[in-house]
Image: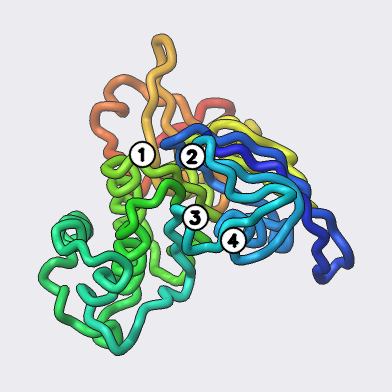
């Protein structure tokens, strides 16, 4: 269990703000932090990492990381941090970047194999694509087998295809190592794919906390429409099938027939249209 109860005064574009967060997270959970820019998401990650100070307490599996008397330095907190800008050592190969953290070649090989980077272990970061660099950054963050993995919009600079690929790899590593993960993201489809729980911050306070479906899913309207989106999931509820679709920055659910549920594939592009009150879903 991770127990967080922190306070910090912030100064943003809209003036002063109190970041006041009380949160309990179960071991092994994948939590997405979302909300408007300037709501305190990144600052919360940095406080958890020990990169910024705050008042209050943080404890991880019974170990106190911060209280009124002490604050562990980042090196003594069992964390991995994945930044937006990769933060790799340009003068070291892929493998050397990992071994700099921990001299464990077996673990480095396992991580490189899981992320399909084993053939690139001797390459320098300057010769890698953005997606490859982010994979190296993710592997390096896992080299200490962290209790807590922190990710600050790690895939925001990548194209949609590469984002989807790395989302699957992030989830695979999360499950393989049983790491508790907190990720800042504004992408609803990314949050739906990865997170078990969504925490929404606004003005430094938690305003919503629940499952991705409860927090993100919005259904609307009986007006005629036709939209294109990505099929994220098909779930069976009692005797019906519900398709979860990302359309722009919104998630919607549409009832589909048994035959449609069997023929549609997760991840494919679909069109959602309606005549009168009955939506129709068609694979593209």
| 3 vs 2, front mark | 3
Q: Are marks 4 and 2 in contact (CB under 8 Å)?
A: no
- Residue pointed to by mark 1: 282
Secondary element at tag 2: strand
- Residue pointed to by mark 4: 50
- Residue pointed to by mark 3: 77
Q: CA distance from mark 1 to mark 2?
A: 8 Å
Secondary element at tag 3: loop
Of the image marks 4 and 1, the number of the one nearer the N terminus: 4
Horizontal side of 212 relative to 262 (left or right) equals right
Q: Which mark is residue 273?
A: 2
| 1 vs 3, front mark | 3
Task: Answer above or below: position of 127 versus 100.
Answer: below
Horizontal side of 3 relative to 105 (left or right) equals right
Q: CA distance from mark 3 to mark 2?
A: 50 Å
Q: Are marks 1 and 2 in contact (CB under 8 Å)?
A: yes
| 4 vs 1, front mark | 4
At 55% across and 32% down in the image, what residue appears? Answer: 211
Q: Which mark is residue 98?
A: none
Secondary element at tag 4: loop
Q: CA distance from mark 4 to mark 3?
A: 8 Å
For this rendering, which residue is in front, 242 or 126? 126
Of the image marks 4 and 2, the number of the one nearer the N terminus: 4
Of the image marks 3 and 2, the number of the one nearer the N terminus: 3
At 31% across and 27% down in the image, what residue appears? Answer: 261
């Amino acid at each position: 269990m991770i127990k967080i109860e922190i306070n910090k005064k912030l100064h943003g574009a809209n003036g002063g703000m109190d970041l006041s967060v009380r949160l309990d997270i179960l071991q092994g959970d994948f939590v997405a932090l979302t909300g408007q820019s300037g709501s305190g998401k990144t600052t919360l990650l940095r406080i958890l990492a020990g990169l910024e100070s705050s008042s209050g307490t943080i404890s991880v599996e019974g170990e106190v990381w911060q209280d009124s008397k002490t604050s562990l330095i980042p090196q003594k907190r069992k964390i991995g941090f994945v930044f937006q800008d990769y933060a790799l050592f340009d003068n070291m190969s892929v493998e050397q970047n990992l071994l700099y953290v921990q001299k464990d070649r077996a673990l480095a090989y396992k991580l490189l194999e899981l992320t399909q980077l084993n053939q690139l272990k001797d390459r320098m970061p300057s010769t890698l694509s953005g997606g490859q660099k982010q994979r190296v950054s993710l592997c390096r963050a896992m080299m200490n087998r962290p209790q807590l993995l922190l990710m600050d919009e790690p895939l925001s600079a990548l194209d949609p295809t590469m984002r989807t690929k790395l989302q699957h790899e992030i989830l695979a590593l999360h499950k393989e190592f049983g790491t508790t993960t907190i990720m800042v993201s504004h992408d609803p489809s990314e949050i739906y794919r990865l997170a078990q729980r969504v925490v929404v911050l606004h003005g430094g306070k938690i305003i919503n906390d629940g499952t991705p479906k409860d927090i993100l899913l919005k259904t609307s309207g009986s007006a005629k429409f036709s939209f294109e989106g990505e099929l994220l999931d098909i779930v069976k509820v009692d005797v019906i099938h519900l398709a979860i679709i990302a359309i722009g920055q919104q998630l919607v659910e549409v009832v589909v027939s048994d035959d449609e549920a069997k023929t549609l594939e997760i991840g494919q592009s679909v069109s959602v249209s309606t005549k009168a009150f009955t939506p129709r879903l068609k694979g593209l």
